[in-house]
Amino acid sequence: MILSQTINAILLPLILVLFLIIANDRSIMGKWVNSLLANMLTVVLIIVVVTATIAMFIAPLIT
Amino acid sequence: MRKALYFLTLLGPGLITASAGNDAPGIATYSVVGSTYGYNMLWVILVIVIGIVLVQDMAARMGTVTGKGTADLIRERFGVKTTAIAMLALLIANLGTTVAEFAGVAAAGELFGVSRYITVPIAGVLFGILILRGNYKKVEKVLLVLTLSAFSYVVTLFIVKPDWAQIAQSSVRPNIPMDANYMMLVLAVIGTTITPWGIFYLQASIADKGKSVKDFGETRLDVVVGSIWGNIISAIIIIVTAATLFKAGIVVTAAEEAALALAPFAGEGSSILFAVGLLGASLLAVSVLPLSTTYAFCEAFGFERGLNHSFKEAKAFYLIFGFIILLGMAFALIPSIPLSI
């Protein structure tokens, strides 16, 4: 059960990158495009998830 | 009083999606987290609150402004190939979770002594009919009622009486072991809250509901309140299992184990409450998750979709939905399915 949730997280950055592009596209969102804060926080989130994913795979190799 | 009631009517997709985030695999995750690491993962919840509000706000904004779902927008902006890849990723993630939801119904039912061969088919058929026959408003009402089952965890919290000082300390200065298991669980906690399917579902149901841009303030409120409430419940489940199981050195690997293990510490009532919460969340997710996957597929490939359409008008929508439910039910009924990975 829990593994399915870990998979959710690993696939999240893929969706978030697509999201970022669409949410910043003025021709789609008009004046409702992402704020700078929203963009920064989303990038941070992507970095956190990717880092945790890499850490999970590397950890057994270095400890 | 009037204002409070009006506020309640504003709640909808945001609350439902957040509550479905505390689904069977979510409850399993939090139970394992709490029993294995005590309060040392609560900081992740704090981080996630920001994350989920951020992401769902984007999804809600996109749904309101364009009136379209996520998959639709991906196809329009990036073309069919990227969409197909995204759909494949979504399908893999969702099928695993869907099976886990039906497994949650099975497990919760069995905690009450009812065989899964009764509960799973009934859940599948009942919610299948609800989706088939109801329009968006009707379905939303039923799902909102199911979100109330989360209150059972709040009650359990008061029974358990945890050490709040220690909670505060562990949240601010957690003891983080740098091992793969911890990382896997950190990802699981993130992944069970900020789910790809939740994103698709929120945007699609907002588009389906037809909210206009000038009402976006209300939509935003629903999203923020729903998300925060969902995370509070997550934290409560971790705290409840940490205060009882972790303290006693009992590590559980599944939600139903946690429900049973609580009894010696917090009384029989707590087990029942836990089971009620598990059942409610599973039933909610059993409708939401297949629905989300169906929305995404229909949008991605341009099929007619939506709860307000009749079966005749949107055959692919209803057929795909039915297929996913049947598949999920089938896997959950296999006797030796490993529910506790």
Image: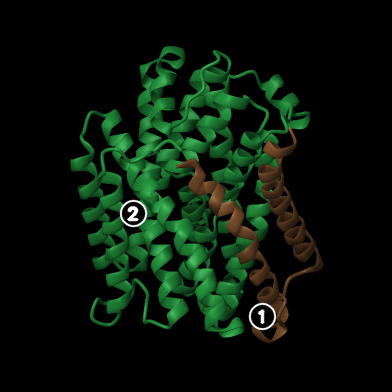
Chain A: what color?
brown
Looking at the image, can residue A27 be seen? yes
Q: Position of residue B176 (x, y in %)?
A: 73, 30
Q: Position of residue B65 (x, y in %)?
A: 60, 78
- Position of B134 relative to A48 (above/below): below
Looking at the image, can residue B69 be seen? no
Q: Who's the residue at 47% across and 75% down the image?
A: B210
Q: Which residue is mark 2?
A: B142
Q: Who's the residue at 55% across and 38% down the image?
A: B234
Q: Which mark is residue B111?
A: none
Specify whether B281 is left or right of B4.
Answer: left
**Structural distance between the alpha carbons of marks 2 and 1:** 32 Å
Element at label 1: helix
Picture quadrant of residue A12:
bottom right
Chain B: what color?
green
- Position of B160 relative to B232 (above/below): above
Q: Position of residue A54 (x, y in %)?
A: 70, 49
Q: Which residue is mark 1?
A: A29
Residue at the bottom extreme of this rendering: A27
Q: Between residue B96 and residue B232, name the one nearer to us.
A: B96
- Position of B220 relative to B302 (above/below): above
Q: Position of residue B168 (x, y in %)?
A: 72, 26
Give the residue type that dot 1 points to: Met
Q: Chain of mark 1?
A: A
